[in-house]
Image (cartoon, rainbow, N blue to C red):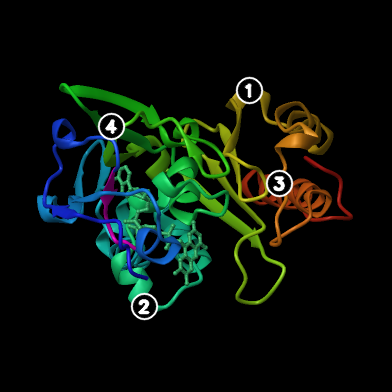
Amino acid sequence: MDLNTIEAWVPTADPDEWRQGDAWLAGGTVLYSYGSQTLRRLLDLTTAGWEPVTQDDGGITLASTCTVARVWELGDPASATAARWPGLAVVRPCCDAFVASFKIWNLSTVGGNIATSLPAGPMTSLAAGLDGVATLWGPHGGLRELPVAELVTGDGANALAPGELIRSIRLPAHALEARTAFRRLSLSNLGRSGVLLIGRRDRDGGFVLTVTASTKRPVQLRFPAGALPDAPGLAAAIDAAIPAALYHDDIHGHPAWRRDMTYRLAEELRRELLDVPGPGSQEGA
Ligand SMILES: Cc1cc2nc3c(=O)[nH]c(=O)nc-3n(C[C@H](O)[C@H](O)[C@H](O)COP(=O)(O)OP(=O)(O)OC[C@H]3O[C@@H](n4cnc5c(N)ncnc54)[C@H](O)[C@@H]3O)c2cc1C
C-alpha cells in the first residue's frame, strides 16, 4: 500500500513532536494495509529502542513496541519465566488468536494492536485478562496510567487523546501468579476471534473473568473469594454487565451467537477454575 499523502517519516517517541495529521508508527501492519487519505507524517516509535520485555518482583513490563513474536517467546511453557508466572499460560493462545503469518507476527506490536482497538485484538485480550495497566505519554509532559480494559472503549475506539501514545503495558504480579484459562471461538478454522474469554483464579481465591471479541470492548467481572458465583450467579452477572447492544456485530459473528457462546465459555471457565465437578455431579459436592 502506498501512503501517498505522507510527506515525512520522523524517528521519534516524543509526544511534543506530534501535530495534526501525524500517526505513531509501530509495526505498520495496519497503517500500511488500511491506507489513509489524511496522514501527513509517520512518527516512528520503533526507533526509540525500548527494551521489549522487562521483569521484576512486581511483574512484567511490555514495551508498546514489543512484537507479537516476542510475546510468543515470553509464553514458552518450558521457560523459567513461565515457571515463575503461571498466569503466562494464556500468552501463547492469545498469540495464536492473532491468525497471521510470521511476517505480521514479527512486525506487529502490542501497542499497535491495542491502539487499533479491534474487538478481536488479541493483545488487548491478553493485557486486559492479566489486569494490564498502560502507561500513556502525552504532549506537554502528559503521563497517566489506565487499565487496558478501560483504554479500549469500543470497536476501533479508545481513550487515547490526540498525540498520546502507549509507552508500555505493566502486567502485575497478582495476575501473573494466578491460575489462568482460555477459551476462544471463531466461525472458521483460521478466522478472526468471535469470542475470546480469559479466566483467572487469583492466589487470594478470587475469580476474574475477562470477555473480549464477543463484545465491542473488554468487559471484566470480578468475584472475591467469599462471593464466588454458582452457574446462575455467573449468568446473572453477565446479564448485568453486558447489555445486548454491547455484543459485537460483524462478519466474524452474529451478536446472538457471540452472546450464547459467551455464556457457555464463561461457565466452562468457572467450572475449570473453581474446580467444580463435571456435568452430572452435584455442584460443590
Ligand atoms: C493478516 C493479518 C491478520 C490480522 N489479524 C488481526 C487480528 O486477528 N486481530 C487484530 O486486532 N488485528 C489483526 N490485524 C491487524 C494488525 O496487524 C494488528 O492490529 C497489529 O497488532 C497492529 O500493530 P502494528 O504495530 O502493526 O500497528 P501499526 O500499523 O503501526 O499502527 C496501528 C495503529 O495504532 C497506532 N499506534 C501504534 N502504536 C501505538 C502506540 N504505541 N501508541 C499509540 N498509538 C499507536 C498507529 O498510529 C495506528 O493508528 C491483522 C493484520 C493482518 C495483515
Residue 62 location in percent, x, y?
27, 48
* Label 4 environment density (alpha carbons within 10 Å; few <14, some 14–19, many ≥20): many
* Label 2 environment density (alpha carbons within 10 Å; few <14, some 14–19, many ≥20): few
Residue at 76%, 31% (x, y): give it: 243
Secondary structure of residue under mark 4: strand
Which residue, given by chain and number where applicable, does mark 2 sit on? 102
Question: Is the residue marked 4 within 8 Å of ligand 1, measured from its CB?
Answer: yes
Q: Which residues are magenta?
A: 22-28
Number of residue marks: 4
Q: CA distance from mark 1 to mark 4?
A: 35 Å
Please state which amino acid type lies under the numbered disc 1.
Gly
The answer to the question of whether label 2 and label 4 lie on touching residues, with beta carbons closer than 8 A, is no
Q: CA distance from mark 4 to mark 3?
A: 31 Å
- Sequence-first disc among 1 and 4: 4
Please state which amino acid type lies under the numbered disc 2.
Phe
Which residue, given by chain and number where applicable, does mark 1 sit on? 226
Q: Which label was assigned to residue 136? A: 4
Residue 24 part of the magenta segment: yes
Check the picture and name the quadrant holding the C terminus.
Answer: top right
- Sequence-first disc among 3 and 2: 2
Question: Is the residue marked 1 within 8 Å of ligand 1, measured from its CB?
Answer: no
Q: CA distance from mark 3 to mark 2?
A: 31 Å
Residue 151 location in percent, x, y?
44, 33
Q: Nearer the viewer, mark 1 or mark 3?
A: 3
Q: Which label was assigned to residue 266? A: 3
* Label 3 environment density (alpha carbons within 10 Å; few <14, some 14–19, many ≥20): many
